[in-house]
Image (tube, grey):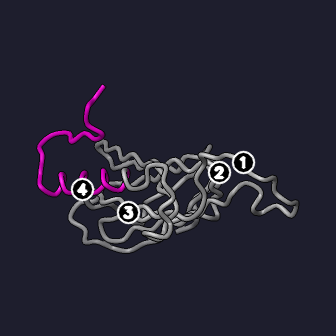
């Protein structure tokens, strides 16, 4: 088992260390604590960023978050994921039972993920399956940063026309 909560493959750079330190502080800050009044979000879903020869794949754990509550936007070299998870029974017309104990987190969240390199923003896809949001980001060569909103879909939905 690793003693460190993150891994830096390959050579270590100042930017890489800064990004990992920022992620570490964010994970600590939101580790099971409701921090809404302090930073405007109620919880922070865990993320994982993987890279292969063709691009990057970002996975976020979003159990109980409906697709309509998730907004994914590429802003320059940063991917922004914003959403909201309603408490159980919040949208039902029937009165909710009184919760006597809960470790679950509800409310708004916002994650900013710095991408290691440029991506083809018009080819980014986001799919929400079984509580996991998977964002696929094809690598680009030599393109400048752009801002693009990415539609979130279910696995069975066709890609929107371009």
Residue 7 or residue 78, whichever sits in front: 7
- The quadrant of the picture occupied by the N terminus is top left
Instruction: Indicate the secondary structure of the residue bearing disc 3.
Output: strand
Point out the tag, 1 or 3, that comes first from the N-terminus.
Answer: 1
**Which residue has dot 2 on it?**
64
Q: Residue furthest right?
A: 94
- Residues under labels 4 and 3: Cα distance? 11 Å
SS at badge 1: loop
Label 2 to label 4, Cα distance in Å? 28 Å
Measured as percent of width and height from the top left, residue 14 is found at 12, 55
Q: Which residue is mark 3?
A: 112
Residue 27 vertical placement versus 118 (above, below): above
> Are discs 1 and 3 less than 8 Å apart at CB?
no
x, y percent for residue 120: 35, 62
Mark 4, Cα crowd under 10 Å, few <14 / some 14-19 / many 20+, is some
10 Å crowding of disc 1: few (<14), some (14-19), many (20+): few
On the image, numbered disc 4 is attached to which residue? 19
Q: Which residues are magenta?
A: 1-27
At 55% from the left edge and 46% from the top edge, which residue is drawn? 132
Closer to the eye: label 4 or 1: 1
- The reply to whether the C-beta atoms of the residues labelled 2 and 4 are less than 8 Å apart is no
Q: Choose the circle earlier in sequence order: 2 or 3.
A: 2
- Nearer-N-terminus badge (4/3): 4
User: Residue 77 lies in what quarter of the image?
Assistant: bottom left
Residue at the spot x=30%, y=58% of the render?
Answer: 115
- Displayed quadrant of residue 143: bottom left
**Disc 1: which residue:** 100
Residue that appears at 65% across and 51% down: 64
């Amino acid at each position: 088992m690793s003693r460190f909560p993150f891994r830096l493959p390959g050579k270590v750079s100042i930017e890489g260390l800064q990004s990992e330190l920022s992620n570490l502080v964010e994970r600590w800050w939101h580790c099971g604590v409701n921090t809404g009044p302090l930073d405007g979000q109620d919880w922070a879903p865990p993320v994982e960023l993987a890279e292969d020869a063709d691009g990057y794949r970002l996975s976020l754990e979003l159990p109980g978050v409906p697709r309509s509550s998730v907004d994914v936007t590429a802003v320059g070299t940063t991917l922004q994921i914003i959403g909201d998870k309603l408490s159980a029974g919040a949208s039902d017309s029937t009165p909710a039972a009184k919760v006597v104990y809960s470790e679950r987190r509800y409310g708004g969240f916002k994650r900013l993920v710095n991408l290691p390199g440029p991506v083809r923003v018009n080819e980014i896809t986001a799919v929400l399956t079984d509580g996991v949001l998977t964002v696929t980001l094809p690598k680009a060569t030599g393109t400048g940063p752009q801002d693009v909103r990415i539609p979130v879909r279910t696995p069975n939905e066709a890609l929107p026309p371009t």
